Amino acid sequence: MKSFRRVSFLILAAVVFHLFLSASIVEAHGVVLDNGTAVVTPPTAFCVPTEQASDAELQKALDFACGQGIDCGPIQPGAVCGDPPTVRSRAAFAMNSYYRSHESNPSFCDFNGIGRVISENPSKRLVPAMGIANILKN
């Protein structure tokens, strides 16, 4: 009977440890556990290019982020986020995706001084009256 209790205790301890570890990982990635259910929380910080960033600097940041494994398919011309097809809008998407892939660590939003972290969701700056979604300059 003692060995059964030891095995039961070890199994219970492993399950509790796994649940604790899972909750920590989930919470670190923008998901909050609420009464046993997972609730995705919206991002509270965004990486965007500065107003002073030149097209050449933006293209460099875009190439870097896409070269680091970020899925840049959505910002290709004609794709879901490909309009407007400006270097600024495409770089903003790639820079923010790269920043998010590094758990929103501000040091991953520098891009040689042309990136900055903001708290306002940049998608709220869309201008639907123009026929296409245009992101205003910051």
Image (spheres, rainbow, N blue to C red):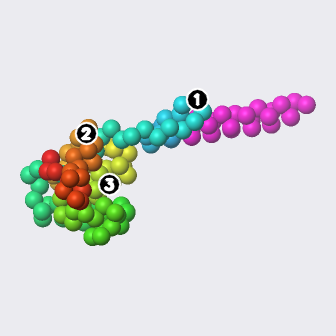
| Gap in angstroms between the C-alphas marked 1 and 2 | 29 Å
| Gap in angstroms between the C-alphas marked 1 and 3 | 32 Å
Which residue matches tag 1?
A: 35
Q: Secondary structure at mark 2?
A: loop
State the image coordinates of residue 42 (x, y, percent, origin top left).
39, 40
Label drawn at residue 120: 2
Sequence-first disc among 3 and 2: 3
Amino acid type for the residue under numbered disc 2: Glu
Residue at horizontal 43 percent and vertical 38 percent from the top: 41
Is residue 122 toward the left or the right of residue 34 in the image?
left
Sequence-first disc among 1 and 2: 1
Given residues 70 and 92, the one toward you in this image is 92
Is residue 104 toward the left or the right of residue 134 in the image?
right
Q: Residues within 10 Å of mark 2 (few under 14, many from 20)?
A: few
State the image coordinates of residue 123 (x, y, percent, origin top left).
27, 48
Is disc 1 in contact with disc 2, using a CB cutoff of under 8 Å?
no
Q: Secondary structure at mark 3?
A: helix
How would you classify the magenta stretch by its main secondary structure?
Answer: helix
Residue at horizontal 24 percent and vertical 56 percent from the top: 133
Which residue matches tag 3?
A: 98
Residue 39 sits above or below residue 74 on the image: above
Is disc 3 in contact with disc 2, using a CB cutoff of under 8 Å?
no
What is the span of residues highlighted in magenta in the rendered image? 1-23
Viewer can see residue 32: yes
Residue at horizontal 74 percent and vertical 38 percent from the top: 11
State the image coordinates of residue 95 (x, y, percent, origin top left).
27, 55
